[in-house]
Amino acid sequence: MEYVVNQIINGICQGAIYALIAIGYSIIVGVVGMVTFTYGEIVMIGAFAAYYTFQLVGTNLVLAILASFAASFIVGGIVYKLCYERFFNSPRHISLLCTIGFSILIKNLAQIIFGPDTKPMINIIENKSYTLEAFGISIVIKQLQIMVLVLVIISSVALTFLFQKTKYGIALRAVSQDKTAAYMVGINVRRTAMVGNCIGCGFGGVAGILLSIYYYSCSPLMGSSFSMKAFSSSVLGGLVDIRMSALGGLCIGIIENMGIMISSATFRDIFAFGFLIIVLIIKPTGFASSGKNRRVKSEKG
Amino acid sequence: MLKIDNLCVNYGYVQALRGISLHVEKGEIITLIGGNGAGKSTTLMAISHLVNDVEGHISFKGTDITRMHPEKIVKMGIAHVPEGRKIFPMLTVQENLLAGTFGNPSLSKAKTAELLESVYDLFPRLKERQKQNGGSLSGGEQQMLAIARGLMMDPELIMLDEPSLGLAPIIVEDIFELILKVRDRGKTVLLIEQNAAMALAVADRGYVLETGCITMSGKGQELLNNEEIAKAYLGG
């Protein structure tokens, strides 16, 4: 029983990071209106930005987060310029292929620049854990896990504030819901889509730090697997619904850890993607309430 | 105020507009009538530059807007209330209305609040539902919201595309009364309607579009009494 509860806590923690990745992904897919496959590399760049910040400046977490956000934001801007901007009126597979190509490019450039090896991440937080006694079982929570959860919650709150309370948030959501209508009310759709894309990438970068801290490592190839997890989480949440995507990420994290519990850690991905397939068979729209939100249209750009 | 000169629009190989010319003067209600596929909506889409293949000239207050970016055209003071409402379904009514103000960056906070108050005055129903999502409104309410959103930017010209489409007759009358009210507030209205009788009754002037060409134009009342139009569009 203890083991189960502690695995669930691990799952929540891991799921929280997936949720943050999925949030960024959903923002991008929503405001740009096209699926991206460069996102895993954006996450990886966020992780490396943090790695080098720790190397050069020392263990300053706030600075590392800012560096990751900035690095991913900028790379996101480049992706937008190269892969989306020219292709709004073209068939959608063109920009899709562009993002795949660009992802291969970044992955390989990263191996040249950063080296192909997995780099150990500095332990930025004391390896301490708290034990809680409740209902006769002891629950162990690591300090690291608390930090990750707190950071994910702070990021989500910041994002919710941006999207719900500011004028820019209304514009971002408007673009995400209906690009033609957004043009009609005078929103600069292209610029808004670009900034939204960059913000989504920035959050991916922050998730990248959390991942590398959580697994004590970062490598140029870490992106691919997480990009698929992010995609799965978003699909679970109906692709563009930010809250539901976060929920999807959380579910995948928990399911993975439950699966590991009954088998072995090598089967991690089987449980994640198996869960996705089962949910989609039962409810093709994912967790989102209607099929309407899920439709990502390519409109005139 | 708005002048269209020899406008042609193509969708691929299909020519939707074949050289139409029309003009709209300040303070007028102008209506474009015509059957399905005559090119009415395309005309508005071309003014807003939401179609690609455009020839000819469109000018607004003396400035050529034919190839201007869509958002800049809105900022010139042209509000486009599209067919099928196209409100933002997952934004609340209030947020939809605020989105309407993006087209006019010169609006101050106080002016925005004032405009909000005035559209809630026009549509008390929207005030009751200001916290609800746009997508949860009924068809008539969504239409009101679309018009209200257009008014929120305090435009000089408001273009309405089929505002009565799919609405109950009693609401249609409300909408037309509202169009007159909007004009009385000093706005210019360009109205597209299937409901030709109603449209011509409120319009100062009208144009008849048939398969991409303007076949007739004149004062609203004249067109209303015209036999051919009565036969083709008024069911007489």
Image: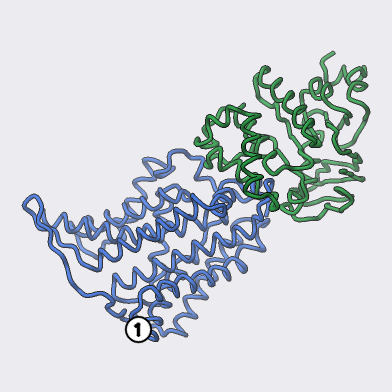
Image hue for chain A: blue
At 69% from the left and 27% from the top, the residue drawn is B165
- Give percent across and percent down for residue B174: 69, 22
At 71% from the left and 30% from the top, the residue drawn is B163
User: In the current view of this chain or complex, which residue is farthest to the left?
Assistant: A136
Image hue for chain B: green
- Give percent across and percent down for residue A152: 35, 61
Q: Is residue A269 left or right of residue B214?
A: left
User: In the current view of this chain or complex, which residue is farthest to the top?
Assistant: B236
Q: Image quarter for residue A220? A: bottom left
Q: Quadrant of the C terminus of chain A?
A: bottom right
At 38% from the left and 79% from the top, the residue drawn is A51
Name the chain under label 1: A
The residue closer to the viewer here, A15 or A274, is A15
At 54% from the left and 70% from the top, the residue drawn is A101
Task: Give the total number of marks visible in the rendering.
Answer: 1
Q: Is residue A90 visible?
A: yes
- Give percent across and percent down for residue A18: 36, 60
Identify the secondary structure beneath mark 1. loop
For label 1, the residue is A58
The residue closer to the viewer here, B8 or B119, is B119
Q: Which colour scheme is used?
A: by chain
The residue closer to the viewer here, A272 or B199, is B199
